[in-house]
Amino acid sequence: MSEEITNEKRKTVLSAVQPSGNLTIGNYFGSLSRFSEFSEMFDCYYCVADLHSITVRQVPAELRRHTYEVYALYIACGLEPDKNVLFVQSHVHEHAELGWILDCYTMFGELSRMTQFKDKSAKHADNVNAGLFTYPALMAADILLYQADYVPVGADQKQHVEIARDIATRFNGTYSQTFTIPEPYIPKESRGAKIMSLQDPTKKMSKSDKNENASIYILDSKDDIIRKFKRAVTDSDTTVRVGEGKDGINNLITIYSCVTGKSAEEIEREFDGRGYGEFKLAVGEAVADKLSPVKEKFNLLMADKSELTALMRDGAARASRTASRTLSKVKRKIGFVEA
């Protein structure tokens, strides 16, 4: 499914975010800010994918902190725990169990073609571990455990859903219908699906970018947000308009559109004759104002870790009830003896 999800009947949505690095406005406008819409129509599962994060070495204290932060950001961005199942991946043991089983139904050639494995292997040549190679089977388990109909992804992540579909189809063909075949939900570009780096606008904004000025993080201060936008790379022109060779300005127009809801044409008219400096400042202020209530709610949540932990525990129990049914069915079909 490529643009809009139809609501023929109540179906299931699954999405997961790794707790590695800070989430950016690309994550916010591309997915998090819209996820609350889904809960009115679908059964929604949102996962903090900490098992996936350890394919790259993590500092334990930072991993714990980021796990709490991503969980709190889910809620701060509008995902109500009573309307959605919010959980931490490692708290639901069925993920690891089904991940291993699906390893045995995933082909070596399929894994070797995965773009993320190639990219991360190049970036972390000193730690090309087995988990980095077989992570698509775990990702398939994340999706298939909940019989997900839709998986919101960026266009560059469609490959992950495709391999999950292949694995599910292979298993169903061997043992009869077991898994729902998931479909990717790729948001429209105009709604923020792809926000680019402020320092290299030919590349997608990344939460792991080493250049601190390249990405706007959801938790950045207003001063930092405005400073980064003022330093955003643009062309030698001074006219705020969409155009070929104007990647930096095109990106800023996209961001401003996400915040204000205005079209590119409306933005061009608004800033006609006003120049890049004034436009950058306006974008920075608009983004900072948009994120302000999110950060306020986030800070309240992070101030009470015991309540967050309780919410995590409840979410894991709810997720496990669904996941255990799927895993039990899988074990019976492949011939495992039940205790």
Image: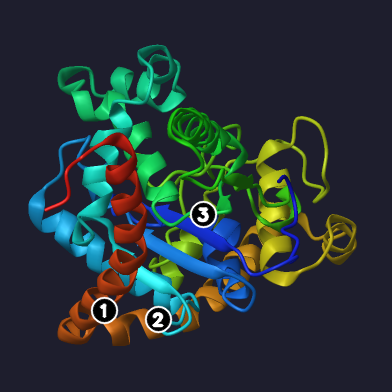
Question: For residue 29, what is the image quadrant?
Answer: bottom right
User: Which residue occupies 82% across, 44% down?
Assistant: 242
- Give, as a three-letter code, the residue at label 3: Ala
User: Can you tell which of label 3 and label 2 is closer to the viewer?
Assistant: 3
What is the number of the mark on residue 21? Answer: none
Marks 2/1: CA distance?
Answer: 9 Å
What is the number of the mark on residue 148? Answer: 3
Question: For residue 86, what is the image quadrant?
Answer: bottom left
| Label 2, residues with CA under 10 Å away: few <14, some 14-19, many ≥20 | some
Question: Which SS class for mark 1?
Answer: helix
- Give, as a three-letter code, the residue at label 1: Asp
Relative depth, front residue between 114 and 172: 172
Residue 3 x, y percent position in the rendering: 74, 50
Q: Is residue 269 left or right of residue 189?
A: right
Q: Are marks 1 and 3 in contact (CB under 8 Å)?
A: no
What is the number of the mark on residue 314? Answer: 1
Above or below — where is 186 with respect to 10?
above
| Label 1, residues with CA under 10 Å away: few <14, some 14-19, many ≥20 | some
Above or below — where is 216 with respect to 155?
below
Question: Which SS class for mark 3?
Answer: loop
Relative depth, front residue between 320 and 89: 320
Task: Identify the residue under disc 2.
Answer: 81
Question: Which SS class for mark 2?
Answer: loop
Residue 273 x, y percent position in the rendering: 86, 58
- Give, as a three-letter code, the residue at label 2: Pro
Residue 161 x, y percent position in the rendering: 52, 38
Above or below — where is 91 with respect to 78?
above
Q: Are marks 2 and 1 in contact (CB under 8 Å)?
A: yes
Marks 3/2: CA distance?
Answer: 19 Å
Relative depth, front residue between 285 and 53: 53
Query: Does residue 43 show up?
Result: yes
